[in-house]
Amino acid sequence: MQVINQIDALRQALWQHRLNGASIAFVPTMGNLHEGHLQLIDRAHEAADIVVASIFVNPLQFGPGEDFNGYPRTFENDQAKLTERGCHILFAPTVDEMYPETQISATVVKVPHLSSIHCGASRPGHFTGVATVVAKLFGIVQPDYAVFGLKDFQQFLVIKQLTEDLCLPLEIIGAPIARAESGLALSSRNGYLSVEELEQAAALYRCLANTRTSIDAGNLNFNELEVAAKADLETAGFTPDYFTVCRQQDLLPASAEDKELVIIAAAYLGQARLIDNLHFQRL
């Protein structure tokens, strides 16, 4: 695997692959890789000839008091995992490489509506930071495909929207959520949990699954289901942020007429803020 730190060097390497007629799939990450990330690499191999991953802890998407400085950085271990999974190129720029004037980009990318609700309401500016760095990375890599996990369903929709609105010539691929045997969605932030908290954390997925079961059984009182799920999360030791039954296309609250649904949730447990979702077509 080739490790590249500079934008110009990456463009030169990819230019040669394009001359040879190769297609390119891209997997952007913030490092601290787990099996969920590596499954994105596997999906990228299915889509294209050359797989490019990036590791960049993006300061623009961390708000005041969030864990930018404390975010786990495990580069050597990540590099070994990517090599084992057959990644061809790892792009690992510094903050100064990505934001050469200052650490705050003069130009930002905003995706209205989707960036201001749910996680966007709890973390103001977060999705502007995500959209800005992803747009920059797309401009640098110019991939044919980009692969994102669906654990952060809201982020996936934000990226799809910016890609469509900016007429970017690539396909966004959503990969299924990787889960532990308990149902807990794999996440870098699971590393903040103790052994006991990891057992507790599986309750988040159980609440999602139970809510879907109720919906499939014909209970379309979504507000009632949301209130009950939050109460169950509190009983399990969580501090709920939100738990909402939404329409898949725009994450607005679902009505009884909607068929394409996604149940999205965020909750605090110990030092971690966990997110998860279930998207499905109502029976």
Image (cartoon, rainbow, N blue to C red):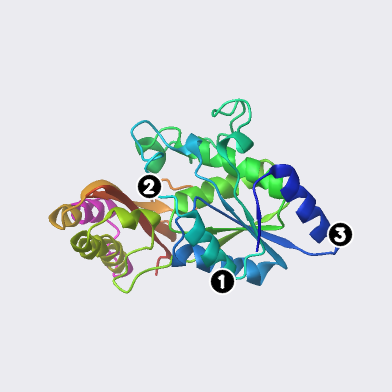
Which residue extends farthest front?
Answer: 76
Which sits in the foreground, 96 or 224?
A: 96
Q: Earlier in the sequence, mark 2 or mark 1?
A: 1
Which residue extends farthest left?
Answer: 235
Give the residues drawn in magenta, as a range: 214-230
Q: Residue tagged by mark 3?
A: 19
Give coordinates of residue 192: x percent, y percent. Answer: 29, 53
Residue drawn at (79%, 64%) of the image: 22
Which residue extends farthest bottom?
Answer: 181
- Which of the numbered marks, if any, corresponds to residue 84? 1
Which residue extends farthest right?
Answer: 19
Circle 1 residues within 10 Å: few <14, some 14–19, many ≥20: few
The image quadrant where one finds the C terminus is bottom left
Q: Residue tagged by mark 2?
A: 253
Type of amino acid at the residue the image marks with label 2: Pro
Asked whether the residues under the numbered discs 2 and 3 touch, taking CB atoms below 8 Å apart as contact, a structural biologist would say: no
Which sits in the foreground, 53 or 157?
A: 53
- Which quadrant holds residue 98? top right
